[in-house]
Image (cartoon, grey):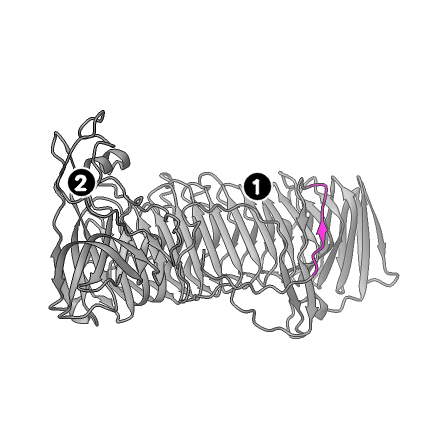
Amino acid sequence: MKTKFVLCFLVVSVTAVCFSSCNRQSKSVASNTTVFNKPDPPVWVLNDDDVELGTDDFFTFDIQPDYSSLNETVYTDPSKQMYVENSNFKDSVSIKYNGNKAIVNCDKDAACTVKTDGANVTIKTTKDVACTLTGKSESGSLKILGNNKVRVNLNGVNLKSANGPAINSQSSNICFIVTDAASTLCDDSTYAEPSDDEKQKGCICSNGYLAISGKAPLKVIAKGANAIHSSEAIFVRRGSNLDIDSRAGSAIKAKNKVMVEGGLININSTGHGGHGIAAKQKVEIAGGRTTIISNAGAGKDGKNSRGIKSDSIVAITGGIVRIKESSIGGKGIRANKFLAKNCIIDVLTFGEDDKITGSKNRGIKGADEIRIDSSRVRVRTENGWNEGLSTHRKVLINNSLVELKTRDDAISAGDPETADIEINNSHVFAYSGMDAIDSNGTLHIDGGVIFVIAQTHLCRGFDCDQKEFKIGPNATIVSLGEITSPPTASLLEHPACLVTHSINDAEFCLSTTGSNDNIVSYQKPKFRYSDANYKVLLSVPQFKQNVSYDFCRRATISNPKHTFHGLSIGGTADNKVVVAKHTFNKNYNDYSLPTPPRPPKNGMLNRTGAMAATPAGATAGTPGAAAAPTEPQASTKTTKKGSKSKPQNNAAPVNAPDNAQERAQTGV
């Protein structure tokens, strides 16, 4: 794969730690602390000099928990109240858990009272207090009462509650969780009845802001409620290392906002109706690496699982986010507005639609807006009638690589009054079971390479309901499907053509007459219908009026400038098999190419369409019966500087059998 990934993480030393409650080794996030805070360079950069525009593993990539080392710089900033070093804790308490009891030591003049019930410790304070936890207990917990700041240092503690949260801060002020050494926290599957107005909503829960930091791994196992919960907001600092096993509610949930500054986060979510990361107002991820594996089954109380969910905004402005959502009716990401910038996002969904709640399976759903800037986004939706990027109103893609494979529309904007899809200077590949790009309003494309495939009968490569469809001067457009919406001819800034092409041809090349240039060529994908023809919409910046072009059944392509999932742009076209010549005499041109004849009952056709003798021992009309072709064995398989190119995923094989042979072997 030639697409370049520019990693922003600075290399520093890595410390590996292992804790007994997890049967695998987790590596800590290595970090340097500096006294400045500068923006990271982007983790991905669109490079127009790349030969391969897409990713080689798009059709096969999987998402699993990733515990490999992550190197980041931890910044300090005196103005940020969520940084623990900016708070002064004069009172300190140390708690050592030992089985069914806890040993508590307080400062002599500490303004707090301590109550112990076996290994359950309750601290009531009137000043900011710092607590250090060590030891191990299968029936212990920590509860903090009051309205002051709290710092909880986890120094190798292994704490399991027997009747509720492991750490419960009822303070309305900030609670800092700092992991100094590998620690594990676990709640119980049933919670005791809370007293008064006490809130018990997670294994770690805070009535106020919750700020998580530290240099060592923290394992959180949630059996009865959310894993980490705040009634206000949650902040995860760079350098953090969270491994969350959420079996009841959501893994990370805040009433207002979740802000992930960075760090290494692995989430396994299996609680019915729970989410990986959720907040009402906003979820923002600005760096680090977040991996969410969700298999929460069917919905609960009318709610279905989402990898990341916000009732308002999900903004991923840096780092790497990978989501595998297998829940029924689940969505990888769900928000009213989804924003991605300077990041890498992979989403896989495997769940069926939920027939009870009516929730549709989606890759990324932004009800009002989806905006992707300078990012690499890949979405595969494997089951259910699911869409890749789905919104009612606006999709905007700028300077990005977007790869989509879906059973329903790959990109969809559904509201007839406000829908608009706009793509600028981006590489977009959409392989769809329905319409590839579907706008019920307008569609604007300016710059980049857009290669879309609609596999199914009566589905469109582009569908914009006969409304405004503008193609700008710098865009290369290739759309394959049984039908497609035509561009608005008056808005075309260079010619476009719609070609009716035989489904029996495995390859196609467009070249200038009298030249061996390759303007654009491709290998035909598999379609889910067997009609004789399909439509190819082509619009390339090199197209000019009053110029003759060769429409070729095949050619040998060498040294292409770009390749993109079976599409080749530029380079040299030799051994051209020309089936038609056309001169563009207007901006929008509509042509039909000759259809290769079908094979007769008692013989096969060779590649020139002439009768071929049946070899001895072979049965006419079956694979292997055709004689050697009389024309050159040319193909649109591309090579660069004489080297062999690897086959593209889901593209027809080079020298694929024609006509009946192809139908017999591929099912097309």
Query: Is-magenta flag for residue 306?
Result: no
Location of the N terminus by quadrant is: bottom left
In the image, residue 454 above or below residue 443 = above
Along the horizontal axis of the image, is 44 left or right of 380? right
Instruction: Examine the rendering and report whether any part of residue 347 can be seen.
Output: yes
In the depicted view, which residue is nearer to us: 406 or 92? Answer: 406
Residue 19 colored in magenta in the image: yes
Q: From the viewer's perspective, tell me whether residue 447 is left or right of residue 150.
A: left
Amino acid marked by disc 1? Arg
Give the number of the mark in front: 2 or 1. Answer: 2
Q: Nearer the viewer, residue 607 or 237?
A: 607
Circle 2 SS class: loop
Q: CA distance from mark 2 to mark 1?
A: 61 Å
Number of marks present in the image shown: 2
Seen at 15% across and 43% down, the residue is 532
Coordinates of residue 28 in the picture (x, y in percent): 68, 54
Q: Dot 1: few (<14), some (14–19), or many (≥20) neighbours within 10 Å?
A: many
Q: Amino acid at mark 2?
A: Asn
Occupied quadrant, residue 642: bottom left
Q: Is residue 545 left or right of residue 112?
A: left
Magenta region's main secondary structure? loop
For image coordinates 23% across by 67% down, the residue present is: 470
Which residue: 79% across, 42% down? 118
Q: Quadrant of the C terminus?
A: top left
How many residues crowd mark 2 within 10 Å: few (<14), some (14–19), many (20+)?
many
Numbered mark located on residue 247 in the image: 1
Q: Earlier in the sequence, mark 2 or mark 1?
A: 1
Residue at 68% over, 52% down: 217
Residues in magenta? 13-21
Left or right? Give the position of 138 relative to 401.
Answer: right
Residue pointed to by mark 2: 606
